[in-house]
Amino acid sequence: MKITRVEAIPFAIPYRKPLRFASGEVHAAEHVLVRVHTDDGLVGVAEAPPRPYTYGETQQSIIAVIGGLFEPQLVGLSPLERETAHARMHATVGNPTAKAAIDMALWDVIGKALDQPVTALLGGYGDRMRVSHMVGFDDSAKMVADAQRVREEHGITTFKVKVGRLPYTLDVEACRALRAGLGDDVELYVDGNRGWSAADSARALDELADLGLTLAEELCPADDVLGRRWLVQRSPIPFVADESATTPGEVTRELLGGSATAISIKTARTGFSASQRVLFQCEGLGADVVIGNQIDGQLGTACSVAFGAAYRRTSNRAGELSNFLDMSDDLLTEPVRITGGEVFVRPGSGLGVEIDPDKLAHYRQDT
Ligand code: MUC
Ligand code: MG
């Protein structure tokens, strides 16, 4: 079996409600659908979400790098030759979501060829994940109402609160309102997307100390090297590196340098192959992990669940798997569902997903 073609199709699906956070905001899922074709007629799929404020990628840059560099490097390889595929793509720096989508589409092809679910090939630990929902910036009352609605409709009881606004007291107040409105039984943690200084982050953590937060993510920039180390040392809760630890090398630097004590794994940027490396590295180093969300659509969410459910360590805590709920539509024939606060791995071979041709025709932007 040989790779014959790698398609990169831009599409846009509006959000019903934008997601706002310290480094940016999302009003529409302007993603790229990646399809890897093989000579025996199998097609693997995945999606790449451009996040210019996080990785510098845009929809157009993803299409250009896939069509101009990666496709010619991959055509003729077997989908099983993943290490070779990565070695060739690695010659181009950056472009994490373009590389990750190709990696996951290759695993989809392999699963289909073997008639096995990707999650079983990865690790086969469980069949579901608990879900954590991300609460974006808004008036405190609206943030509470959003979280209450999500809890009622989907049974979700873990919430990641976006923080990082100035003054930091805005977010302290929002977190207090969420704890008061949701009660003590929900899990709350915070993600600052580098919006605060180390000093503001420390003040905020002090003022939030009685709320029982479980994690603090990227409160200040990792490039403020000494400030960040100082903050992490005095943090009473695990400090998660997300956008500062996007490769195995960065994970090593952040953990061993004392700039983080836990790692967010996002299949949207490390695919399945490099996510495995990061996970095993964290296991070996004794660092906690959380399955994060690159504001994925349903296809990306199916990938995160396939990976997260495959291992014990990633199944231990709720994964961030619900951002697609804010999208007005999606591309899959069978929607991803969250019930009782959980999402199940898709049955079937590969990723177990199918793209609805009518929806793709409607949302694609290249025709
Ligand atoms: C997150 O966890 O930070 C927002 C920006 C980004 O890169 O990812 C999202 C969610
Ligand atoms: Mg984050």
Image (tube, helix red, strand yellow):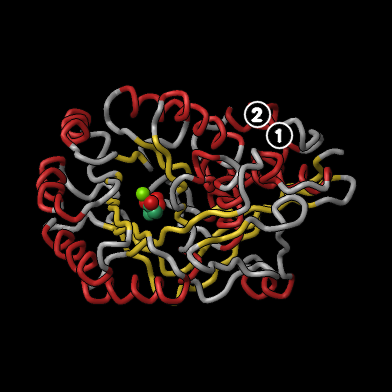
Viewer-nearest residue: 68 or 206: 206
Residue position marked by numbered label 2 in the rendering: 88
- Residue found at x 34% / y 27%: 255
Q: Residue furthest right?
A: 40
Q: Is residue 303 left or right of residue 130?
A: right
Q: Position of residue 2 (x, y in %)?
A: 84, 38
Relative to 161, residue 1 above or below: above
Q: Position of residue 16 (x, y in %)?
A: 44, 77
Identity, as a three-letter code, of the amino acid under mark 2: Arg
Residue position marked by numbered label 1 in the rendering: 73
Identity, as a three-letter code, of the amino acid under mark 1: Gln
- Residue found at x 47% / y 42%: 265
**Which image quarter is the C terminus in?**
bottom right
Q: Secondary structure at mark 1?
A: helix
Q: Is residue 249 left or right of residue 231?
A: right
Q: Are marks 2 and 1 in contact (CB under 8 Å)?
A: yes
